[in-house]
Image (tube, rainbow, N blue to C red):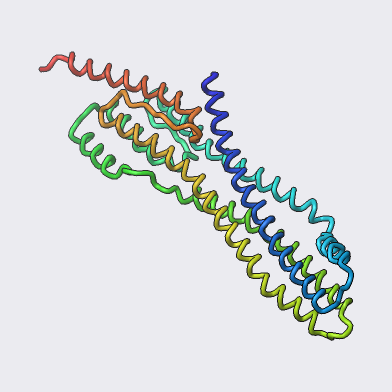
């Protein structure tokens, strides 16, 4: 029980690390866009000073503070965005353990009578489990025969030799991570638009002798800086998608590790057991799967002894 609790904590820690990575990208987007907006506003203020639109140095900081006096709802939207981002990412990460929970349940049901049970929801573990149980069921019920050897050779020939991407989860993680990052980054762009919109309104109020030229300068500068903000949005979105895909790949790797041991078992290495690395999904489930494999190994050994002891005609 203590080991099980340790393994659960390890997996929760892995999920939390994924959450922190996405939260870090969200904060990076906010900081990046704030820096772009601040740099643009400082250039605007420098233009105002050069054109004597403002003459008192104290107005510089006053204008800067006024420009970044954001709408009240934005102060709630950003923390809510990070919290929502983190909560969804954590729950999505925990959902990966469901595959291994169903994997364990399928093996426990299989071990009751060595008849393949009905099961669903195994994700990347589905084909491994079906093929393994099909071969074991045939081996126990009919013994080794030319037909069994042929069928085993066919299945093992198609057995993956390396981790296979489980595209359903990869796409779900990528889309989810990208959507959350894009949403939060776009929220950050609202700061850029509000700050530049305020400086544009202020320039119109301060313009007396330059007519429309000064406001046009600020408008042009905002349009030139805007692509930098969107570059941050796109960059953070891509990085978040890659982080999501990388995290989802741990499930595919753990599933392959399970399948690799199962294939060793059906090849005749009945001491083969499943072992997963720290932080892999399903670590807390494989111990009970290994109990079924140990029981199965004993059943095969018993059958082999009965075959040897059976008198020949």
Q: Which image quadrant: the N terminus? A: top right
**Residue 312 locus on image (x, y percent):** 12, 17
**Residue 112 locus on image (x, y percent):** 42, 22
Using the rendered view, name the quadrant where residue 185 is placed.
Answer: bottom right
Pick whichever, 92 or 119, lies toward us. 92
Count of number-bearing discs: 0
**258 vs 35: above or below:** above
Pick whichever, 37 or 238, lies toward us. 37
Using the rendered view, name the quadrant where residue 132 is placed.
Answer: top left
What residue is shown at x 55% (from left), y 58% (from top)? 238
Query: With 85 as the anchor, is 259 left or right in this view?
Result: left
**13 vs 114: above or below:** below
What residue is shown at x 79% (from left), y 56% (from top)? 74
Query: With 69 as the anchor, is 313 left or right in this view?
Result: left
Q: Which image quadrant: the C terminus? A: top left
Using the rendered view, name the quadrant where residue 300 is placed.
Answer: top left
Query: With 155 as the anchor, is 2 left or right in this view?
Result: right
Pick whichever, 45 or 287, lies toward us. 45
**Residue 92 locus on image (x, y percent):** 59, 43
What residue is shown at x 42% (from left), y 48% (from top)? 165
**36 vs 137: above or below:** below
Residue extending furthest left? 313
Pick whichever, 134 or 181, lies toward us. 181
**Residue 162 locus on image (x, y percent):** 34, 44
């Amino acid at each position: 029980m203590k080991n099980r609790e340790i393994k659960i904590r390890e997996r929760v820690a892995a999920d939390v690390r994924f959450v922190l990575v996405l939260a870090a990208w969200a904060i990076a987007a906010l900081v990046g866009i704030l820096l772009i907006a601040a740099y643009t506003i400082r250039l605007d203020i420098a233009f105002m000073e050069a054109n004597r639109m403002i003459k008192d140095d104290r107005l510089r900081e006053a204008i800067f503070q006024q420009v970044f006096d954001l709408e009240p709802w934005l102060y709630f939207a950003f923390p809510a965005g990070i919290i929502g981002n983190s909560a969804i990412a954590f729950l999505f990460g925990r959902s990966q353990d469901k595959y291994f929970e169903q994997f364990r349940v399928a093996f426990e049901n299989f071990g009751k009578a060595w008849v393949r049970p009905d099961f669903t929801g195994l994700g990347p573990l589905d084909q491994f489990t079906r093929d393994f149980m099909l071969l074991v069921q045939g081996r126990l019920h009919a013994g080794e025969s030319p037909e069994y050897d042929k069928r085993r050779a066919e299945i093992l020939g198609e057995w993956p030799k390396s981790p296979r991407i489980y595209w359903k989860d990869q796409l779900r993680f990528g889309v989810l991570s990208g959507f959350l990052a894009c949403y939060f980054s776009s929220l950050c762009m609202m700061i850029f638009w509000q700050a530049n919109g305020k400086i544009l309104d202020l320039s119109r109020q301060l313009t007396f002798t330059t007519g429309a030229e000064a406001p046009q300068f600020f408008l042009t500068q905002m349009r030139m800086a805007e692509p930098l903000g969107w570059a941050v949005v796109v960059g953070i979105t891509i990085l978040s998608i890659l982080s999501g895909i990388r995290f989802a790949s741990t499930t595919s790797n753990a599933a392959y590790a399970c399948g690799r041991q199962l294939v060793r078992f059906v090849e005749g290495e009945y001491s083969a057991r499943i072992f997963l690395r720290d932080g892999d999904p399903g670590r807390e489930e494989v111990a009970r799967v290994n109990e079924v494999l140990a029981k199965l190994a004993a059943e095969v050994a018993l059958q082999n002894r009965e075959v040897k002891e059976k008198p020949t005609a």
